[in-house]
Amino acid sequence: MPVAESNPQSAIRNPQSGEVVVSVRGLTKVFKDFWGRSKARAVSDVDFDVKRGEVFGLLGPNGSGKSTTVKMLLGLLYPTKGHIEVFGNSPRHVQTKARIGYLPEESYLYRYLNSRETLDFFGNLFHLEKGDRDKRAEQLLEMVGLNQTRTRSVGEFSKGMQRRIGLAQALINDPDLIILDEPTAGLDPIGCREIKDLIIALAKRGKTVILSSHLLSDVEDVCDRVVIYYGGKIQALGTLKELLAKPDTLRITTPVLPRPTMERVLEIIRKDIGSGEVRVDNPTQNLESYFLEVVEKAKQASQQTSGAQSGARVAEYLRGDVTSTPAPDKVLEKLTLPTAATPAPVAAKPAEPAVNEQKLDALTRTEPVSAVSQPLPSPQAKAEDLAKADEKLSSLLGKKK
């Protein structure tokens, strides 16, 4: 019975030719501050090639240099050092840009245009004829499953639907190089499978795909080769079979067998299974496990990274430690601490002031205390005073007459 070697990537075609589409040599990008001082070394001395008909994966933790590399491949950023060629030209070459399709991580679309108008707009940017634009738009909308929502504005779309129309606009110019940044983000499982099938179909047509994703299962399903970044440097590069295989062990795959048969040697197995196929190959580990292993080795080798790091201890206030003592100036923290067993001393009551008996007696007297005060006049005296005033007034009026 023949023994066949299995290839975990057998469902994916090999690159159709040795033509190099993207060539990167010594690529370095250092971001600087306003004063020209180095702030972050995003990419450091990177080399790789991408061939025609290949699906090439860019992997790495957040901030490891993937997006910076993509932007330099698109001509959106200038490298500090190194050399990039896309189809044998600079990535800033206008005719070269016309051969590239790009799906960014975030879908930057005009929210008031509908699906049909969006594709027509991007097709017009590539100077496509009206007939070609209409034909391609119809085919793309059907391909990404938005044929029934062509009249809805893009601003009403969910994230998954925006990713679908974003992918359609990336393909409107029939590009030879397609760069996809997180293409399956926000998509349902069916949409993810459709996108992966589409990527494989494009590669079979001779298209070159560069895929950046954090979903390692997606990368494992479609990519021919991958590169793993950490700290702006390439930590691993090769085909998935090369990177994931364990050459020091062998795996034998057979149909389900009774227990006694499983305990026999390989020769007895071949005899008992009849026409069943026995495959012997190198077992592989999970891409996610390999990815984490590469990153851990890079960390242990003191590789520096300007991106996010893992393994840090959780902040104290998030851990909810109750044993920590607040600083003396943290008044609110002190107020919320449990009360101590010994009560705090009570402040002594201030002594009452002594009463001045003389002042109290003067304030409560009914008679006036001033020496110059006179008693009130009697009613009879008031009447006599009014009569005298009246006589005096009459005499004065008589004189005037």
Image (cartoon, rainbow, N blue to C red):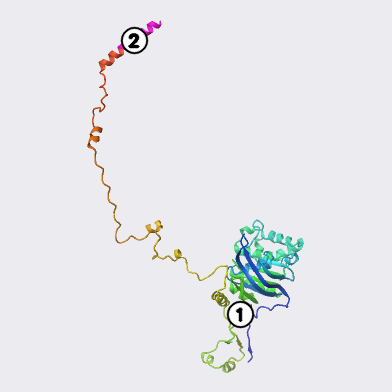
In the image, the segment drawn in magenta is: 387-401
Q: Which residue is mark 2?
A: 392
Residue 180 in the image, given as x and y percentages of width and height: 65, 68
Residue 319 appears anywhere in the view: yes
Q: Which residue is mark 1?
A: 243
Label 2 sits on what residue type?
Answer: Lys
- Along the line of sight, which residue is nearer the eye, 253 or 101? 101
In the picture provided, is 359 more to the left or to the right than 196? left
Does 265 sit above or below residue 143? below
Q: Secondary structure at mark 2?
A: helix
Residue 235 in the image, given as x and y percentages of width and height: 60, 75
Q: Are marks 1 and 2 in contact (CB under 8 Å)?
A: no
- Give the dominant element type of the magenta stretch: helix, strand or loop: helix
Closer to us: mark 1 or mark 2?
2
Report the residue at 70% width, 70% height from top. Answer: 84
- Along the line of sight, which residue is nearer the eye, 180 or 373? 373
Report the residue at 59% width, 80% height from top. Answer: 244
